[in-house]
Amino acid sequence: MTVWDDLVGQDSVVEILRTAVASAQERLAGGKGAAMTHAWLFTGPPGSGRSNAARAFAAALQCLDGGCGECQTCRTTLAGAHPDVSLVSTDGLSIDVAEVREQVRLAALRPGSGRWQVVVVEDADRLTEKAADALLKSLEEPPPRTVWMLCAPTAEDVIVTIRSRSRQVVLRTPPVAAVAQMLTAREQVAPDLALQAARAAQGHVGRARALATKEAVRERRRAVLAIPGSLTSVGACLDAAATITQTASAQADEVAERLEDSERDALKMEFGVEDRGRRPAGYAGRLATLEKDQKRRRTRIARDSIDGVLIDLLSYYRDVLATQTAPGAELVNADVADGVRRLADAGSPEQTLVRIEAILGCREALEANAAPQLALEHLLLTLRH
Amino acid sequence: MASLFSTVLLITGGVEFLTDRAMRRALAQIRDEDPEVAVSDVEAASVGAGELTALTSPSLFSSHSAVVVRGIEGLDPTAADELLSYAAAPAADVALVLTHGGGQKGKGVLDKLRKLAAVQEVTSTAPKPWEVSRWVATEVRQLGASISEEGAGYLVSAVGHDLRSLAAAADQLVDAATGADGSRAPISLDLVRQYFGGRAEVKGFDIADAAIDGHTALALEQLRWALNNNVAPVLITSAFASGLRSLARYGVASSKGLREAELAREVGAPPFRLKRLRAQLRGWDSTGISVAIGAVARADLDVKGAADPEYALERMVLTVTGARTE
């Protein structure tokens, strides 16, 4: 076992990082270590394992054996608990300049273990412009033992001055076979289920894992994929739209229930608020900010959930189009091939393309803050025609 | 009315317009008593320690002075203490007018003020929705005229519940009812109609109903009124979306032979809407509904984006009425 095991289907990236780790070792011993550098930018599609790659790299740098995956150092780094590795991420919408300044300060410290001081920014695409600017100086000329690792979906998601200061590592969409193999080996999933899940997730490792291990997730996907075949009347379209929006807000509520109360309690604790009596100065403002953030998070979760449905629908119509134009092509949703075939026989490729356009249009509309239920009703009515 | 000097007038209540007016009336009365009075007007939130004492001290330049302190809920504790000690023993040639914006904030100071002998309180409360037409009648009476009950009712349904607009309307009507010789006829329903006819507080649902019924001109007219009255465009699109949604659901459910209550639950509309929906459904088929929902979805996006909301909404109304089968 090594730290690289989690990187599914990224052999060439692992090769680059291994070389870098060897060079880093050389540098620590006083050599030149040409393959190592101080700023890295990990890019790749969602679910390809950008932040996992960064963490594994960090672990390998800290580990005395170059990433054995078993020692204390490797395990604490991968778990995000190593004192010389800080992880910056957010479940909000952006990372602000104050947080980055703090990280820049930490990055200037000497590593406690005597090896490397690593800062992993997991959502570099969410850095505000000011925050990105605050990073530049340290990114260009960090102290000798400091390594920055930034993760973003594409290199275009970070400002050009960051891009030009870092070495880019491009992760690819992991191949289906590699994902399936990982599921079988690590999660003890039966091979055919693993293959099906890997295919349906289209290279998103986390989603593949959820599909392979959670019946509820599979159930939800089945329900979504049953939608195209069920759109026989206006009523059915409206019902389906209502179900999708209700499920999305139920998911948001579930997360909300889990987090919101404890966040409010933590804030009360911080200000020493008791149930009765005066509220300390500043508390009301902070509470309002917190509630606004919580509401925004609910919206984001609900929107992500609807987007997931749209992606599944998109893959379904992609299969319909594939069946219509290239019979025998491999299907993403092979488990519902019958439904795909029925829809393929009932229409022309042109119609399918119009439908795919409509789904993409709906995603854009939701991105532009459209009313979700209305946008979905419009979409499903269009799909019905 | 007794003199306001050497007293403290406390104006409370959450209706800004009424508070404001009570304050203006008090100032007018003070000026009547002494046209030379020196008036100072301050926001309580910006009053520092010692300032109130300075303001309520005798003035060098005029024998009388009046001090207005707005929003005493924002007063800081030191200044509040000064206020209380002044109010316990007000100066003979100073009139102090305080306003409180309603709510719980600053209640401690209010309660202490109310116990003092020199403090007179004027409370303004907003009339309840069913009291608004009586409020209008009182308003007109205070202006020295009278209005018929139907006239007041019509005015409220035309202008809405905003007291400021109603007061302005009452003022205008009293002016109109006053003849050249100064004689005043009672304000009749016809006079109100003449001035405020056709203008009504339009809700998004009214526009949606008109459009779904196929009354294009009416829908467009109401849309204009709504936009002029600052009804948010998203409320109009969401009213259209929900109107079409219940129409479509009614279309599906009505063929199932359900009883009234079950039908209402199935449609997701209150029972009294069902009759209206039945009438509306005659002009619609499933293609029409799809087209209409598409138009609403597009308008929803347009009003949230950079497009001109008036154009987007008018196009939506026209597409919806055009999607009917007749």
Image: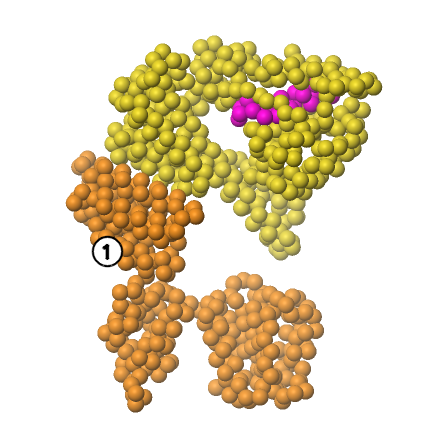
Q: Could you tell me which residue is drawn at 78 percent across and 16 percent down?
A: A26
Residue A119: where, in percent of width, then height?
Answer: 69, 30
The part of the image, by quadrant, that contains residue B297 is top left
State the residue position of label 1. Answer: B217
The hue in which chain A appears in the rendered picture of the protein: yellow
Does the rendering let one see residue B54? Answer: yes
Please, which colouring scheme is shown?
by chain
The part of the image, by quadrant, that contains residue A199 is top left
Q: Could you tell me which residue is drawn at 56 percent across and 74 percent down?
A: B98
Is residue B76 shown above or below A208? below
In the rendered image, residue A138 lying in the magenta stretch gets the answer: no
Q: Could you tell me which residue is drawn at 25 percent across and 29 percent down?
A: A232
Quadrant (top left/top right/bottom left/bottom right) for the C terminus of chain B: top left
In the visual, does A217 lie left or right of B60? Answer: left
Chain identifier of the orange chain:
B
In the visual, does B89 lie left or right of A332? Answer: right
Q: Nearer the viewer, residue B128 or B171?
A: B171
Residue B153: where, in percent of width, then height?
Answer: 29, 69
Identity of the residue furthest to the right in this view: A30
Task: Report the chain holding disc 1.
Answer: B
Is residue A369 shown above or below B110? above
Q: Nearer the viewer, residue A70 or A273?
A: A70
Identity of the residue furthest to the top in this view: A191
In the visual, does B25 lie left or right of B169? Answer: right
In terms of secondary structure, where does tag 1 sit? Answer: helix
Residue A328: where, in percent of width, then height?
Answer: 36, 11
Residue B228: where, in percent of width, then height?
Answer: 36, 60
Q: Amino acid at mark 1?
A: Ala
Q: Dot 1, crowdedness within 10 Å: few (<14), some or many (≥20)?
A: some
Boundaries of the magenta span:
A42-63
